[in-house]
Amino acid sequence: MKIVVAGTGYVGLVAGVCFAEKGHDVTCVDTDDKKIKLMEAGISPIYEQGLEELMRSNFAAGRLHYTTDYKNAYKNPDAIFIGVGTPELPDGSANLGYIATVSRQIAENLEKDCLVVVKSTVPVGTNDKVEQFIRDFLVHKEVKIEVASNPEFLAQGSAVHDTLHAARIVIGTESRHAEKMLQEIYEPFKLPVVSVSRRSAEMIKYACNDFLALKISYMNEIANLCELVGADIEDIARGMSYDTRIGSNFLKAGIGYGGSCFPKDTKALKFIARQYGSQLKTIEAAVDVNAEQKTRLFHKACDRMITFQNLKVAVLGLAFKPGTDDLREAPSVDNIRLLLESGADVYAYDPAAEENSRKLFPEGGIGKGHMSYVDSPELALKGANICFIFTEWKQIKSLEANQYKELMQTPLVYDGRNLYSPAYMEQGGVEYYGIGRQRRQ
Ligand code: NAD
């Protein structure tokens, strides 16, 4: 099938590449000329394992094209997938500006019947409006369009794998024709398809993300209580994980969820509920818990330190999770901001997110502090007075206690990802603080 994907971010690009991999003819459209040029040169603008290889092979096979020329691209495809951003507005609602722009561009250029599929996460009822909006602005009035919902469930860091081996594909349609078309598009993936109404599909996406956010905030609160009562959250999680009613995933306590999805999708659902005169008390609590959890490590260190002024602070990991270069809502950002405001001399290491971090914290003096980037965790630790761990990259996880002890001036480690057992670190001569751990709290 001839498919166009609008937006080549984490969702759009991965979807486009995977559709091409499964034999469809795919054109990826983006407004960002720099991204398009990079992709044409075989370089992925985002870091995702296995993506570049598939981009190159499918581009070489002639099944994958990149363009900024949306006018031409939207003329005659069978289906257009929309994967543009729906970021958070100051009031917590979703910004539908990018969706509206693409919808208008489609309406003004489409010359043949087409299925428009919204992959972006959008508030319930948005796709009804997108359909109406495109119909209102269609230049070729004889053209028939339908809008379907096909929310995306990939996780950054394993996006290609998650797309090719998704647990399920959710499709939300209002006609048998749209349902059949989507089933046909996904047929080569050989994955279970959950076919529901458009509004239910939109709601499934929020219900999933917000449930996971809730689970993380729950574990973080239990971890905070563990510190007070003298229990260890890693043991608690292990004990819980065997209960199949609970499941073993998302039981890891830490410094809060980040990324482009959980923070905005929890706030958006809270907003949607309030719009309907309802209140999601559990989700509101998850949002509040997360906001506090993100800077918990810094505040913990404040309890121990008299000052950060002129101290060398090693920051290990910047991305909101391993396997991605994404810094959106990453806990590292809040903590680095506080450290720089407090006069710290920050030496940061991240194998993928440094470039994005430089846009937020350029090298040099910032506030009362100073920002530097280094190419290895060892260089960050060398001569450091204190170390913060924000991302569980394997390059960081593989460090041993004696490396902290030997490299740092004062081996003091605040670990937001509970990478080590406190006993192991203490035996290795490291003063170690995790989240919800039994010792040294
Ligand atoms: P992103 O910000 O990485 O990418 C969006 C892309 O859209 C950018 O490249 C931008 O240049 C492009 N764009 C903007 N306006 C455009 C236009 N008019 N025409 C063509 N391209 C345009 O976003 P993302 O992380 O891929 O997320 C996209 C959507 O998918 C969001 O709604 C998000 O909530 C949802 N989602 C994201 C993830 C994730 O892990 N990132 C997972 C599931 C769902």
Image (spheres, rainbow, N blue to C red):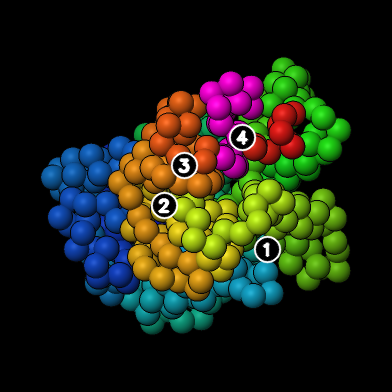
Label 2 or label 3, whichever comes before in sequence order: 2
- Label 4 crowd (10 A; few <14 / some 14-19 / many >=20): many
- Residue 348's label in the rendered image is 2
Label 4 or label 2, whichever comes before in sequence order: 2
Asked whether disc 4 touches disc 2, contact meaning CB atoms under 8 Å apart, the reply is no
**Residue 24 placed where, x, y %?**
29, 45
Asked whether disc 1 touches disc 2, contact meaning CB atoms under 8 Å apart, the reply is no
Q: Which of marks 4 and 2 is in front?
A: 4
- Picture residue at 24% right of the left edge, 63% below the top: 36
* Residue pointed to by mark 3: 409
Decide if residue 178 is in sight here: no
Label 3 or label 1, whichever comes before in sequence order: 1
Q: Nearer the viewer, mark 1 or mark 4?
A: 4
**Residue 102 placed where, x, y %?**
42, 72
- Residue 106's label in the rendered image is none
- Residue 268's label in the rendered image is 1
- Picture residue at 78% right of the left edge, 36% below the top: 227
Disc 4 from disc 2: Cα separation: 19 Å
Q: What stretch is highlighted in magenta?
A: 412-432
Q: Nearer the viewer, mark 3 or mark 1?
A: 3
Decide if residue 314 is in sight here: yes
Q: What residue type is labelled 1?
A: Ala
Assess whether residue 165 is covered by the magenta stretch: no
Q: Which amino acid does label 2 sit on?
A: Ala
Look at the picture and state if 367 lies above or below 225: below
Callout 1 secondary element:
helix
